[in-house]
């Protein structure tokens, strides 16, 4: 059942207020305090939230992000517009080499798909605003094709690159990574939210080790490629980039541009996605390209297959099984797995923006599960507010509060 109109109106207003409060003038922060910079995929979702009440502001969000694009085509995962000591590790630790201080890795490229949504919302403005960005998007997508493929699947080179920081999917690859002795360092995240909801220190030691290696090499991909100690083929990246290629090709066609190069990438990733099929577990899974090991995890990223245009019969029973085990789906990790933790970040909690991608993929294939997931997500937000993420068993809000992407997903999709 959808909510009463008054409830929806009140929450619409609250969501707009959050988006306005998190606007730093040209870019949004995910939430005040915990995340004081511009994050890549957060911004793409923020854009569709702004589009609910200010189309111009929506396009500005993507323009600011693309203005941070590096010379090699990479669009960074965090853009450090103004230094804020409340977040660690900041620009000095990363040593990014782009036009604006930034990190040296990327994030799931949902931006082209969100740009297509903005265009559909206002085609005239879409044509005008996307045209100057089109080539930049092609260069960014090409950067993934040049530097992140393994047998056609898209790899991450840092847990933060996938946006799913501490998921059990990388436990094996992380255990094989020997952390450097980094001396004392002061984390800031646990000063904002309870440590029980955040990654462990052993995770941070490894996150920072990878940053140090990249910084030393000035993030020169050609030099880093062969010796990088963490390289994991990931369904999040593979499915999201596959969908983004399709959507970028559509945008290019609307602009009358040659899209043959983009179209040539689609079958490569379709074949790559099949290399992520774990035949024993019968799910899309993560594979460590260095050890060859499967993660043996059913995660919410496994269910992005429909978003990517792939309908695999075995995935629907998995989705229904994990959702039956919780009050609010889709849990980020299988509740039947011993690694499941209901509140610890990407090890179990529900993330509204991934729910939207999963549900819309299901809708496109005609499954009712998508509409059910939308209703369920709306109820979770109505009962628990605009948290960063939610405990799937109780719905309890977790992580940062007044979160941009949860507000945006409410405005664009869930409400
Ligand atoms: C961090 C901002 C980001 C998201 C990621 C999420 C988290 C940052 O927050 O990472 O410091 O751990 O995992 O997906 O973009 O919301």
Image (spheres, rainbow, N blue to C red):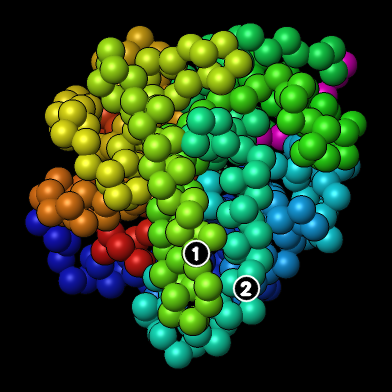
User: Which of the image's four quarters has the N terminus?
Assistant: bottom left
Q: Position of residue 110 (x, y in %)?
A: 49, 55
Q: Position of residue 175 (x, y in %)?
A: 61, 9
Q: Which residue is mark 2?
A: 133
Please determine whether, in this image, residue 355 is positioned above or below residue 20. Answer: above
Secondary structure found at label 2? helix
Tell me if I can see residue 194 in this picture. Answer: no
Quadrant of the rendered structure where residue 212 is?
A: top right
Crowding near the residue tagged with mark 1, few <14, some 14–19, many ≥20 C-alpha atoms within 10 Å: few
Q: Quadrant of ligand 1?
A: top right
Please determine whether, in this image, residue 346 is positioned above or below residue 10. Answer: above
Indicate which disc residue 260 carries: 1
* Residue nearest the observer in this picture, 403 or 203: 203
Indicate which disc residue 235 carries: none
In the picture provided, is 15 more to the left or to the right than 196? Answer: left
Q: Point out the frontmost of discs 1 and 2.
A: 1
Query: What residue is at 21 percent from the left and 49 percent from the top?
Result: 362
* Stretch in magenta: 183-189
Query: What residue is at 30 percent from the left and 50 percent from the top?
Result: 309
Tell me if I can see residue 329 in this picture. Answer: yes
């Amino acid at each position: 059942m959808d909510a009463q109109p008054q409830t929806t109106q009140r929450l619409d207003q609250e969501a707009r207020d959050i988006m306005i409060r998190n606007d730093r003038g040209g870019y949004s922060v995910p939430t005040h305090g915990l995340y004081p910079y511009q994050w890549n995929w957060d911004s793409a979702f923020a854009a569709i939230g702004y589009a609910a009440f200010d189309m111009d502001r929506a396009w500005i969000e993507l323009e600011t992000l693309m203005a941070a694009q590096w010379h090699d085509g990479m669009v960074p995962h965090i853009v450090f517009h103004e230094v804020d000591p409340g977040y660690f590790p900041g620009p000095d630790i990363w040593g990014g080499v782009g036009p604006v201080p930034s990190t040296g890795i990327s994030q799931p490229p949902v931006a082209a798909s969100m740009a297509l949504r903005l265009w559909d919302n206002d085609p005239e403005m879409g044509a005008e605003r996307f045209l100057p960005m089109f080539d930049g998007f092609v260069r960014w997508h090409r950067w993934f094709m040049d530097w992140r493929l393994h047998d056609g699947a898209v790899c991450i080179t840092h847990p933060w690159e996938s946006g799913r920081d501490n998921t059990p999917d990388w436990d094996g690859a992380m255990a094989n990574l020997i952390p450097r002795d980094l001396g004392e360092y002061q984390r800031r995240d646990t000063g904002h939210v309870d440590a029980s909801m955040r990654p462990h220190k052993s995770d941070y030691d490894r996150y920072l080790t990878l940053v140090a290696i990249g910084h030393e090499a000035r993030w020169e991909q050609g030099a880093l490629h062969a010796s990088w100690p963490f390289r994991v083929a990931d369904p999040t990246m593979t499915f999201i980039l596959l969908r983004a290629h399709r959507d970028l090709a559509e945008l290019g066609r609307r602009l009358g541009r040659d899209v043959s190069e983009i179209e040539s990438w689609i079958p490569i990733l379709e074949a790559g996605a099949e290399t992520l099929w774990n035949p024993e577990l019968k799910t899309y899974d993560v594979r460590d390209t260095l050890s060859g090991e499967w993660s043996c995890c059913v995660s919410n990223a496994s269910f992005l297959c429909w978003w990517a245009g792939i309908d695999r019969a075995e995935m629907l029973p998995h989705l229904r099984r994990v959702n039956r085990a919780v009050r609010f789906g889709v849990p980020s990790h299988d509740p039947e797995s011993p690694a499941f933790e209901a509140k610890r970040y990407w090890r179990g909690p529900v993330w509204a923006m991934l729910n939207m991608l999963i549900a819309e993929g299901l809708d496109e294939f005609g499954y009712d599960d998508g509409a059910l997931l939308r209703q369920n997500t709306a109820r979770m937000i109505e009962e628990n507010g605009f948290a960063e993420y939610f405990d799937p068993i109780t719905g309890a809000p977790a992580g940062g509060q007044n979160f941009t992407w949860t507000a945006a997903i409410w405005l664009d999709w869930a409400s």
